[in-house]
Image (tube, grey):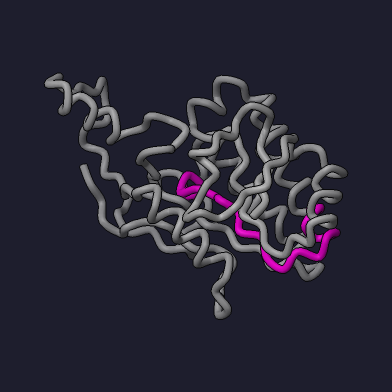
Amino acid sequence: MLLLDRPGSFTPASGAADGNSVAVFEGDTRDREALVEVMARHGVTHVVHCAAIAGVASVAADLYTATTVNISGSVAVLDAAHQAGVERVVDASSEEVYGAPGFDVIGEDCPLTPISAYGLHKATVERLAEYWVEQGLDYIAARMSWVYGPGFPRDRLPSPWLHDAAEGRESRLDAGGDHRIDLVYVDDAARALVALLYSEDLRHRAYNVGQGVPTT
């Protein structure tokens, strides 16, 4: 297993899985030449692309940098994968591509109408990927719902509520308490990515990853 991450981001706890050895390379996904070299030298056949500045607030805080990472970086990954002869790329997309459709059950055929810059980034990458699909790259978009749990890089809900409960504090929200969210535990999200990476009978280019159950 190979992992490419920005310098200083990798820790053994985040990279060791079931005793498998992980070769770590530090770099930037916007460096297409480095990506091509690493993929070709190590005979990479499958890629899970999770590198991003993730989250609506994080993207809005530095839109210029986020755009270069999320769009230019993704284009570099897809182009490098195509050049290296990678068999399949699974791209960690987001339910943010749907925007706010106004109903609970969202199918993969729902129109992409993002309302945030982050959602627009993800939708744009999915559309750009069609260029390499036409050239033979097997690209799958995994539209992740609300992932949470240990090891997740952001302390997103419901984790802060669990911390509050453990320490006897009240949980408060300024707004949004009536929102309905499809919560996905991080281990389940990882299993979904692996399933999409190696499944032999995939009929679609995009799959929603979630429980299918809304939680208020």
Instruction: Looking at the picture, tell me which residue is in the foreground, 9 or 59.
Output: 9
Whether residue 46 sits left or right of residue 81 in the image: it is left
In this figure, what is the number of numbered marks?
A: 0
Q: The C terminus lies in which quarter of the figure?
A: top left
Position of 142 relative to 4 (above/below): below
Whether residue 214 sits left or right of residue 118 in the image: it is left
The stretch in magenta equals: 79-98
Residue 68: image quadrant is: top right
Q: Residue at x 32, y 58 (%)?
A: 211
From the top left corner, tell me how far across and down residue 20 is, in percent: 55, 55
Q: Is residue 77 magenta?
A: no
Whether residue 157 sits left or right of residue 193 in the image: it is left
Q: Residue at x 54, y 63 (%)?
A: 206
Instruction: Looking at the picture, tell me which residue is in the foreground, 17 or 215.
Output: 17
Q: The N terminus lies in which quarter of the figure?
A: bottom right
Position of 204 relative to 11 (above/below): below
From the top left corner, tell me how far across and down residue 176 is, in percent: 27, 30
From the top left corner, tell me how far across and down residue 104 is, in percent: 30, 54
Can the viewer see residue 113? no
Whether residue 149 sits left or right of residue 39 in the image: it is left
Instruction: Specify the farthest residue to the bottom.
Output: 201
Q: Residue at x 20, y 21 (%)?
A: 172
Residue 141: image quadrant is: bottom right
From the top left corner, tell me how far across and down residue 6 is, in percent: 67, 32
Q: Residue at x 72, y 40 (%)?
A: 25
